[in-house]
Image: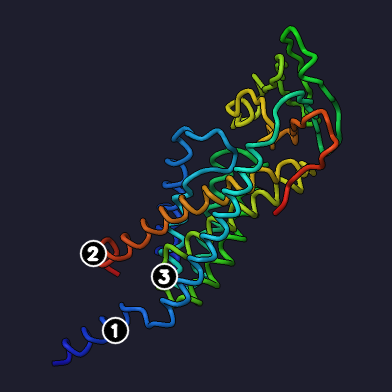
Amino acid sequence: MNLKRLTTLSVFTVVALTIFMLESAIPNPVPIPGIKLGLSNIVTLILLLNFSSADAFIVLLARIFLSAFFAGQAVSLIYSLCGGLFCFVIMCLLNRFLNGHFIFITSIFGALLHNAGQLGAAFLITRNVGVLAYLPFLVLSGTITGLFTGLCAHYAQKYLLPHIPR
Amino acid sequence: MKDMSSDKIEEKRDRPQPVFYRRALLLSALVLVFCLFACLTIYFRLKEPANGLTAYIYQNGQLIETIDLHAVTTPYTFTIPAPDGGSNTVEVRPDAIGIIDADCPDKLCVSTGFVNSTLLPIVCLPHRLVIELKTSNQSQPDVISY
């Protein structure tokens, strides 16, 4: 890993971590566990579009571990990892499938799979079928939040990134 | 001249080819189908009767307490210790149940508030605690179909 790549990825990790911490400081308006905007996914999307999947994966993993360290919850690491990995795999595949176009659709599927992964982890940990009652709510919320973060990434890609020297 | 041609290439790459429009349409339709299923599931679960509720409290997947909420006349609270040392304080009211205090960091179970329907269980993930409500007459099976 050369110095330029390391620095670029570090900067993106810091951006993702900052977004994550800011978002977690906002109180959740919906009292359903698992519903959140997932704004730090914007960074993953931007990296998938402009860099390689490997770069996006490194930043995602660094962000997940660092955020668990900063938020100080060991149990949330399992959910974050499960959701993050599911989300990353589907976004990688769809980004290839759509050749980098329609990033908001990739983002919606990412959010859906993220929620599904977290619910799966919750099911495995509580071993209770009842938690699956959250699934329809998480599908709806994932579609809305995924569309939102996807559009954020779309416009960041269109208007913001051309001004950043590379 | 060279700039113009590269601009054209840029423009061509910017506009998705028809095949990607078709793929995007397909995926959007898939999302819509998911959402439709979710709405239908929520709609039918909202129509489930909410009388004669019984609360089933699970810890680590094991049933540790059953409370007939309809038989409750005066509210009371009790504390469920978690295996890792934490605890949840549960308040039982006539036809409703809720977690009023917990020492987990996110307190999502507390913000869920009191539930009086079968729609959603109360979950405390850090303490692996689930409080599920079911109607007491168990003649009809659980309709959870995804």
Q: Earlier in the sequence, mark 2 or mark 3?
A: 3
The type of residue carrying mark 2 is His
* Element at label 3: helix
Residue at the image position 72 percent from the left and 51 percent from the top: B145
Q: Which residue is mark 2?
A: A163
Residue at the image position 69 percent from the left and 35 percent from the top: B48
Location of the C terminus of chain A by quadrant is bottom left
On screen, B20 above or below B37? Answer: below
Mark 2 on the same chain as mark 1: no
Residue at the image position 32 percent from the left and 60 percent from the top: A156
The picture places residue B61, in percent across and down from the top left corner, at 83, 39
The picture places residue A135, in percent across and down from the top left corner, at 64, 48
Mark 2 or 1: the one toward you: 1
Chain letter for the residue marked with disc 3 in the picture: A
The type of residue carrying mark 1 is Lys
Chain letter for the residue marked with disc 2 in the picture: A
Q: Is residue B31 visible?
A: yes
Q: CA distance from mark 2 to mark 3?
A: 16 Å
Q: Which residue is mark 1?
A: B12
Residue B89 located left or right of residue B5: right
Mark 3 on the same chain as mark 1: no
Q: CA distance from mark 2 to mark 1?
A: 21 Å
